[in-house]
Amino acid sequence: LGAGARGNVYGDYAVEYPEQLDIVGVAEPNAIRNERYAKKHAIPSANRFNTWEDVFKKPKFADAVIISTPDQLHYGPCMAALKMGYNVLLEKPISPSEKECRDILELTKKTGRIVAVCHVLRYAPYFIKLRELMQSGTIGEIISVQHLEPIEHTHMAHSYVRGNWHNSTTTTPILLAKSCHDLDIIKWMLGKESESIQAYGDLKWFKKENAPEGSTPRCTDGCAVEKTCPYSALKQYYRKRQRTYVFDLPEDKDKQGDAILEFLKTTNYGRCVYRMDNDQCDHYTTNILFKDNVTATFNMEAFTPWGGRRTRVMGSMGFIEGDMSKFTIYDFRTDQSKTYESKVLDVENYKNEGHGGGDWRLVADWIQAVS
Ligand SMILES: NC(=O)c1ccc[n+]([C@@H]2O[C@H](COP(=O)([O-])OP(=O)(O)OC[C@H]3O[C@@H](n4cnc5c(N)ncnc54)[C@H](O)[C@@H]3O)[C@@H](O)[C@H]2O)c1
């Protein structure tokens, strides 16, 4: 359900491993996406739907459903799928409402079905190894953790200033939309319950008062500072051709440039980052007190040149520092250090966004669980 970016990440697993996963239906209101998905997976017209509601009007015709609809459309399809006996792969965040999360949990228990939530970092070899080292006492007793989620300034502009997650009231707050992975992974690595939490965050930069003189409502309107603006839509989408998957471009490469320009003139992706109706924080800092007085700090930062995650773990007998491609363990007892490298590539479209190979490993695990 939802044949956008994530629906294609999971669907592409079926193309690579058809003996494990067969996509037999699609629900997607965007006609181009629906058509492309149906073609890729040879889906018969009877199993193509405009919206998730229609899927559940038909008797059960698959073992499981993948829910990769926008954040605010997770609860409805998940409850409907469970009621009909489907197992579910559910995109994060489960729901912005605690009650809805608990309803889903209750219904999984009642129906005996599986709802796997796409916390892909738990499947990244890097984090699996880090957790194993932390929990096996390699650096003694864990005292504290520092974890940074650098969003990368152009990714911030793309998703949380201009894109689908720009306003927390129509989607979910950025701490859920983006950082639920990080809050989850800290707790998962420590293996402890949290006891108290404190957080500060703010939208400091992407606001009207910071619009430079000579800037215009759209980057394509003849903006006087477009050429030097790091957030220029023309630079990101037209000149660098980054993150253009959101546009469903024509397959003919010669037609793509004009299509991008048209999208920049007509959609939010061409609007000035200082003149959006955005409200998502561009920096967030969180302190968490875990059981046994272990502390963790978490920072989400928009203004970085790269994405991914950076983590430091302080232990009584050693220290670990890593950047999601490799980490180094320092042993205070021997004065030795050792580096662990995880050479896993992210799937298409998510190469620099720091899932560390977790996307497809999660799908593989889920298939095993539900079959
Ligand atoms: N696990 C991760 O690391 C990760 C990464 C990015 C996004 N996400 C989450 O995945 C979900 C999808 O994100 P995305 O980036 O693929 O967004 P997207 O906008 O590319 O895809 C969502 C798709 O759902 C479709 N849709 C809208 N209404 C629908 C309806 N009523 N029925 C069926 N389909 C409908 C949209 O047309 C769109 O194609 C979001 O909840 C997002 O937060 C997870």
Image (spheres, rainbow, N blue to C red):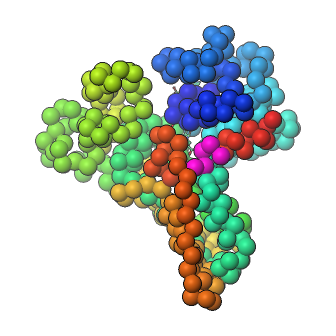
Residue closer to the observer: 224 or 308: 308
Q: Residue at x 72, y 15 (%)?
A: 57
Examine the rendering and report whether any part of residue 226 can be seen: yes
Examine the rendering and report whether any part of residue 104 can be seen: no
Residue closer to the observer: 247 or 166: 247
State the image coordinates of residue 328 (x, y, percent, origin top left).
Answer: 54, 73
Q: Is 40 located above or below residue 8 in the figure? A: above
Q: Quadrant of the N terminus?
A: top right
182 with respect to 55 (left or right):
left
112 with respect to 310 (left or right):
right
Q: Residue at x 78, y 20 (%)?
A: 60
State the image coordinates of residue 67 (x, y, percent, origin top left).
Answer: 64, 33
160 with respect to 77 (left or right):
left
The boundaries of the magenta stretch are 357-361
User: Does 360 appear in magenta?
Assistant: yes
Q: Quadrant of the C terminus?
A: top right
**Location of residue 275 (image quadrant):** top left
Q: Is 347 located above or below residue 35 in the figure? A: below
